Amino acid sequence: MSEMMAPPPPTVAAAAGVIDARKTYGLGDAAVNALDGVDVRFEPGKFTAIMGPSGSGKSTLLHCLAGLDSLTSGAVFIGDTYLAELSDKELTELRRKQVGFVFQSFNLIPTLTAKENIVLPLALGGQDGDEVWIDRVIDTVGLRDRLTHRPSELSGGQQQRVAVARALATRPTIIFADEPTGNLDSNSGTEILQFMRDAVDEFGQTIVMVTHDPFAASYADRAVFLADGKVVGDQAAPTRESIMDQMAALGH
Amino acid sequence: MIGTLARKSLRARLGRNVFIGLAIMLGVSFVAGSFVLADSMKATFNNLFTELSENTDLVVRAELVGANETEGALRDPIAGDLVAEVSAIDGVELAQGSLQRFAQMLDTDGEPIGTAGAPQIGASWSGEGPLNGITIKDGRAPDGPDEVAIDKATADRVGYDVGEQITIVLDSGRRDFTIVGLVGLGDTDGFAGATTSLFDDAAAAEILGAGDMVDTIEIALADGADIDAVRADIAEILPPRVEVVTGEQVAEETADAINQIVDLFGTGLLIFAFVTAFVSAFIINNIFGITIGQRLRELALLRSIGANSSQVRRMIVIEAVVVSLTATIVGIFGGLLVARGIIAIFNQAGAGFPDIGLTMQIRTIVVSLIVGLGVTLASVLIPARRAAKIPPVAAMRPELGFTALSASRRLVGGAVVTGIGVAMFLVGLFVQPGGGTGLAFFAGGGALLTFLGVTSLSSTVAQPVSRAIGAPIERLFGQSGKFARDNASRSPRRTARTASALMIGVALISAGAVFAASLRDTFGRVLDRAVTADYIVTDDSFQGLPPAVAQNLGELDELADVSPFRSIFGTIDDDQVAVTAVDPESFDELIDLDVVEGGYDGLIAGNGVMVYGDAADERSLELGDEVNVTYQNGLESTLVVSGFFDDNSLGGSWYISLDELERASDQTPRDQFVLARLADGVDPADGRAAVEGALTDYPQAGVQDNAEFRAEQEGQINQLLVVITTLLSMAILISFLGIAITLALSVFERTREIGLLRAVGMTKRQLRRAVRWEAVIVAVFGVVVGVVVGLSMGIALAIAVPNSVIDGVTLPWANLLFTLVLAIIAAVVAALYPAYKASNMNVLDAISHE
Ligand SMILES: Nc1ncnc2c1ncn2[C@@H]1O[C@H](COP(=O)(O)OP(=O)(O)OP(=O)(O)O)[C@@H](O)[C@H]1O
Ligand SMILES: [Mg+2]
């Protein structure tokens, strides 16, 4: 379905994206095409949800976008950088400076306090970061009175808020979140979603979030649907209902 | 079922079990090796001496009273005429006189051939076999005054062969010989490391400068002769103080003497072997502790599906026993290698051991099994018991798992054990109940308990201490340093135990260093105060200098005072004492004995004796009192107390004149060293040239000035320290292996954390640095605790030793600093693999690691 296209000039207004991304696991008969020719770009300052059935390649796409994994073929860019050209060291630096992460679980280093976890990417780069900005992030996620606590002393929701704060602390080009609300009750989940929404609205942050939950996806500006490693749908301003319709159409 | 589980788990955790096995194996092979070496050397030497004396039925020799040859006492020679008289006795088939003296072979460049401490022997050739066991390997026996047979080992080493010329320095001077034969003892090529030159029997007495004397007479009896009867007949014709004994007895005495040395050596090795095993126990305990901690969920799952706690315990113990049994068996065989290795090292150093067949006694196997299994069981029982107590619910919530002993209980327990250990150690050193065994039991046991107690205590301070050690690292290395610091203080018990393994080795080295430094400085002070001689001529042959050395020096105009220092054993009031003979006219100018009453006049006049104050007090001696002495050769003499002195740190509490000694003994005089002082106004360079010129025919005489002498003595003490450190190196090696293993396990445990760190931007280099500095913090912690414990032990040891040996404590800061630096480097090396493991983890796999 996707004809080969020339890579767009990196100046194109996209915070990140993949071009004809293919990712194959295994060999021969056992080969699985986790990504089967995906083309997708994420506009700056937008909140995008990636949806799709289990095994459709959502996590794989996210990992490749974030430089944690490499494609079998195709290209990934973040800002104006093509990841394939980077050494491990440069990739690490890119992750530290330009990418923010929120995982489903185990987001924090147990030996560090909440505050230390938030500024960890900055500390790794030997920087102090922008104090005013970090203060603002901390206030936004409402963690002021928990800063000296260690992860074991925080609830799951609070831990996830720390993770979002950490992702925001470096003002990355883009934040990737893989089912960030998957382990939370609906109240905590809603809180996290609202923070991400606020970050997009107030700070112009770009966020890409994988989720199974139509309610979570309804917080996004756009919903991209994957199935069997292919993009099968793309909605702007999705609502719960429009998402449920699309999912039903995909056979769920 | 439990067996199957244990087997599967063993296989799944192969890497870790190999590490555990390695630690056990190293400990066991060192223990087994010590036994094997001692047993094998004893068996070999005993066989050798029995074999050699097989045909010697009787031996005639001078008596030795109140002294023995192991301590260096030499028998007097006996009259050569006795050989003919003994031969004439009925029943004597063959009687041969033998002579043995100093003989220094020179190599083709005219340089003395060294032996690394073994004697340099010149002896009479008594024919090949049957009485002396010598065999010709090449050429023939020496015949006439210009021929020599030398040992094949030396010939091969230096490159001499039959037909070549060799220069040999003897008491009779420097002489040239033609090598006509190469010989060895029995099947061996040499004489256990000694350089040996054999001369024609008839010419030997003249060549060796022995006059018409022989050392001993070996006798073979005719077939059917009654040994007791012949022995009685021989005894009849012997002059006083000459005895006839059986060849068997001589062989036994020689073997006993060797066995004593081997035992001493073996016991020393064994002590270090046990230290190594003890250190392994810490490492093994730590590994079990960590792996069981990591398996909590699995164990809890077993419990929740119905395994009872004794099944869980059994599974863990079975696993441990299988690993340790395998490792112990490998270790026992490793012991053979260790023994071979040590023999090879000694041979490399020129010991020339005969071909030693290794013997493995049942005792060795039993002890090795006890050590191997014991160490493992001691290490695994507590973690296994704790693991068995895991509540099944921990399968779901692993943080519920272990309830470790509370810090306060560990503090109290550690303090009590340390207290008992320190008390035992001090009692052992200062009260010394039960002599040598008591000392070993109390001091050794006390040290062991102290180590255990300190380990327990140190886990309560591991957190603050490792944070303190890490503080500068964090300041220097930022976030990597912070991780190192956090991780090191994260599980204080793990850090403490890993560090403790190192602590033991460092403590023993530090204690040794304090002892050696104190010994060295005390000796230095003694030299400074007491030695006023400008030159000390030492004996590099270890067989005593011929009196011609002192005579030659005495004739030099450049020297004002010259005195030999000559010791002999004697018995006074049933106590064995060393009596030192000096030249009383000049000795006071060379050594200041700190004379407090009387003086050397009595010695100059004749049979006067100067007595060390304490020895005099013991016997309530006054000036002018008479003292009866029996010298080692059985001659008796009466000495008159003519002075008291207060400094016996150079050795010797009884000083007599050379004349008195010569009256008392017709033994070949041998000087331990010769002291000399420059005449006024002589330039030291001229003096030295003169001294060296006078000694060209005595290559075994080393000329040293005061500073050189001191440096050499200090060098010897330092060498002692090197030996101790080398023997502890196995324990230290294991402790660094422990650091590497613990770190690797910790890295594995923190896989997800590492994945996360990498995901949010930690570089590989930063990660490696964090692991590396964590190792350094642990190592520095171990060194710091070890130095504190070791310094305390060393100080106690230095104080416990009599003041004449050590009169003040010196702290060897340079050594300790060196240890610290070395430990940091070793820690960095130990961290190489774990750091590599950590930095090369696949980020994605790590994040999703369970
Ligand atoms: N390391 C791997 N080795 C082999 N196959 C893999 C690997 N990782 C993912 N896959 C396969 O690739 C496909 C896509 O997996 P991916 O994790 O991206 O799915 P997903 O959309 O994130 O699913 P979920 O919603 O369950 O998280 C699946 O078929 C999966 O089995
Ligand atoms: Mg997924």
Image (cartoon, coloured by chain):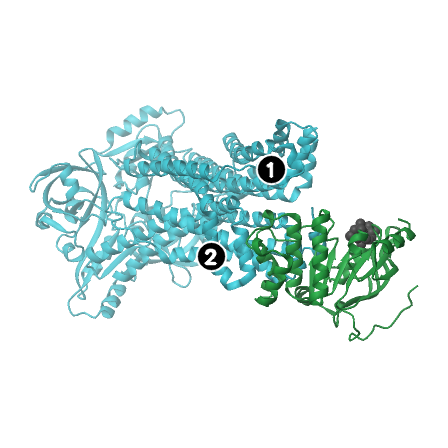
Q: Quadrant of the N terminus of chain B?
A: top right
Q: Position of residue B625 (x, y in %)?
A: 8, 39
Q: What is the three-letter code of the residue carrying label 1?
A: Gly
A86 vs B595: above or below: below
Kindly give the residue lying farthest to the left in the view shown. B624
For the point 85% across and 51% down, the residue is A53
The residue wearing badge 1 is B401
Q: Which is more toward the observer, A7 or B6?
A: A7
Confirm if mark 2 falls within 8 A of ligand 1.
no
Q: Secondary structure at mark 2?
A: helix
Q: Which mark is residue B822?
A: 2
Chain B takes which shade in the image?
cyan
B226 vs B807: above or below: above
Quarter of the image for residue B532 reads: bottom left
Q: Position of residue B450 (x, y in %)?
A: 40, 40
Q: Position of residue B206 (x, y in %)?
A: 29, 50
Q: Position of residue A100 (x, y in %)?
A: 69, 62
Question: What chain is colored green?
Answer: A
